[in-house]
Image (cartoon, rainbow, N blue to C red):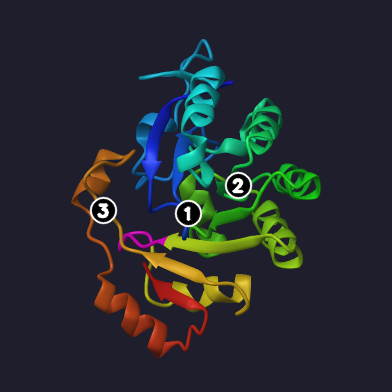
Amino acid sequence: MTFSGFIKSDLVNYPGMIASTVFTCGCNFRCPYCHNPEFVVMGSDETYFGEVYSEEDILSYLKKRGAFLDALVISGGEPTLHQELPGFMRRVKELGLKIKLDSNGSRPDTLRSFIDEGLIDYIAMDIKAPLEKYHLLGFKDTGCILESIRILEESDVEHEFRTTCPRILLQEEDFPEMAKLIGDRTTWYLQTFNPAKTLDPAYNNVSSFSREELEDIIGKFNLVNAKVR
């Protein structure tokens, strides 16, 4: 398996863990505000743009540094698109490391298989927008999103939901609609949007809801499981 990005030491992406993070390339969404545009598009010959790390590169590092690491974060792009991923995850688990998966929730059957096999210890799933706006992100099968939410909420795997908050995509009234999708049992992180680097250059000039505005929205709509990150 091939990866298009590698952070050797990461204290941010897995709560409470010292981790490494890998990024898969290729995504079935086209979120215009995506801050990892280099990981979204695959070349026409199915090779990756930019820097490339082999599965053996990653495993070799994890074996050498395993005593200092708790976990591996697998992000993207959208990792669940890759058929080779379960085999890689099994090898990581053999090293005694936990695995966190970042996903857009578009492939519920794959998500379920990872959970059933015990390959994942933590999952962060994006709630991009109210379902009626998902077509703006290049994805229309919102039934998959609802199924992935259901799978996570019925599982014993630790998980979170998260939403990046660019102002042009989301309006204040969208937040309670998103809250209805996930209930109030799981933490839902609202993240400010950083326009420094985006898939659609037009979003470089788009502002984010501020932390203060997001806190006000949480209070106004009584979003009891929401927190600003």
Circle nearer the N terminus (1, 2)? 1
Q: Which mark is residue 17?
A: 1
Indicate the position of residue 75 as horizontal and vertical percent values: 50, 41
Question: Which residue type does callout 1 highlight?
Answer: Met
Tell me the residue at 30%/57% (across/down). 193
* Badge 2: residue crowd in 10 Å (few <14, some 14–19, many ≥20): many
Say whether marks 1 and 2 touch (CB < 8 Å): yes
- Indicate which label's residue lies in the foreground, 3 or 2: 2
Q: Is residue 154 magenta?
A: no
Tell me the residue at 21%/45% (across/down). 196
Q: Which residues are magenta?
A: 164-169
Question: Which residue type does callout 3 highlight?
Answer: Asn
Q: Is residue 22 above or below residue 13?
A: above
- Position of 89 with respect to 43 (left or right) is right
Q: CA distance from mark 3 to mark 2?
A: 29 Å
Tell me the residue at 60%/48% (across/down). 140
Indicate the position of residue 54 as horizontal and vertical percent values: 51, 18
Q: Is residue 167 magenta?
A: yes
Q: Which residue is mark 3?
A: 194
Q: Is residue 44 above or below residue 60?
A: above
Q: Which mark is residue 98?
A: 2
Circle nearer the N terminus (3, 1)? 1
- Position of 192 with respect to 20 (left or right) is left
Query: What is the quadrant of the C terminus in the image?
Result: bottom left
Tell me the residue at 44%/32% (across/down). 40
Is the magenta region chiefly helix, strand or loop?
loop
* Name of the residue lying farthest toward the front: 67
